[in-house]
Image (cartoon, rainbow, N blue to C red):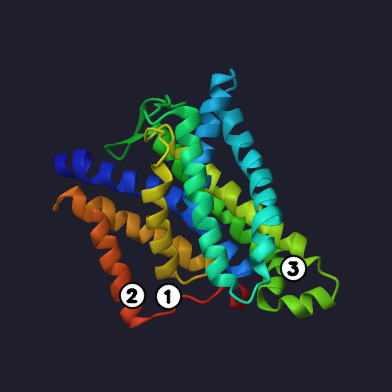
Amino acid sequence: MEWLQFVLAPQMINGLSIGVAVVLMALGLTIIFGLLDVINMAHGEFYAMGAYLAVVLLGLGLSFWAALALAPLIMAVLGYLTERGLVQRVFHSRDRHTLTLLLTFGLAVVLEDLLKIVFGANPVRMESPITGATEMVGLFFPNYRLFVMLFGGALIAAVWLLVFRTSLGAVVRAAAFDRQMSASLGVPVARVYAATFAFGAALAATAGVLLAPIYSVFPTMGRDFVLIAFSVVIIGGMGSIKGAVLAGLLLTQVQSLSSLVISPVWSDPLLFGIMVLVLMWRPQGLFGKLGHA
């Protein structure tokens, strides 16, 4: 019982709280790929910028809750401008996949260096807005991690409802399935693309704000985290929302619980090994693309 209470349960809670944030990042990646067919290599930097925006807003005297609302909105605007100003310039090229990948990779390098120049290389620690722990069935759960799970879970459910249960989501899925037909029916495809890219950036920024009180904020924080998010997207299926959610929660639990029996340095190789096995068994991932869901 003591091992369950003080070892296993905290690891599972840690895995769930990190898993929710990973799913939010992976949702942004998979929605952008499912609609635009663009692999956004700068998505990790959007995550880091969300965390740094929270640090700046807190420094201006705002509360964490205001930062949680404003940082994703600011990143949505920046994401919209990025898509319209950069991605669209190479989107219709014959070598679109290569050019957009190289473009977003270069953007990731520039953004990471800008964060180093503006904020320095030293980590910044953010205080948790919710302290203490809650006892349930004899187990203690940190209150902030419970909030991350509940808030993130509600946001994931809202994204699913938006995509699959609203007319706006129907427009997005139609543009993902057949952009020419959607355009001929009057759908402003270019604006839908830009808004979707902005929405993905906002989800990444939300994950950054939520995890900032758990981890330190530093310029390269998005580099490693986005690798996990890409693994989730690949395993779940490029462009699949359901796949991103299930794979994200599963992989972070595997990563968290495996650290009880093996060194944490092997957690990432373990995830990548799972990804390789899934690709060998099912190259398209576990589920289909957004436009075909």
The percent coordinates of residue 101 (x first, y second) are 52, 64
Q: Is residue 4 left or right of residue 135?
A: left
Q: CA distance from mark 1 to mark 3?
A: 25 Å
Q: Is residue 155 left or right of residue 280?
A: right
Looking at the picture, tell me which residue is in the foreground, 75 or 83.
83
Q: State the residue position of label 3.
A: 171
Residue at 55% over, 26% down: 56
For discs 2 and 1, the disc positioned in front in the rendered view: 2
Q: State the residue position of label 1.
A: 286
Q: Is residue 27 visible?
A: no
- Which residue is farthest right? 186
- Quarter of the image for residue 232 reads bottom left
The percent coordinates of residue 66 (x first, y second) are 61, 29
Seen in the picture, residue 120 relative to 160 is either above or below; the reply is: above
Residue at 20% over, 38% down: 6
Within 10 angstroms of label 2, few (less than 14), some, or many (20 or more) residues?
some
**CB under 8 Å between discs 1 and 3:** no
Q: Amino acid at mark 2?
A: Val
**CB under 8 Å between discs 2 and 1:** yes
Q: Amino acid at mark 1?
A: Leu
Q: Amino acid at mark 3?
A: Val
Q: State the residue position of label 2.
A: 278
Element type where label 3 sits in the image: helix
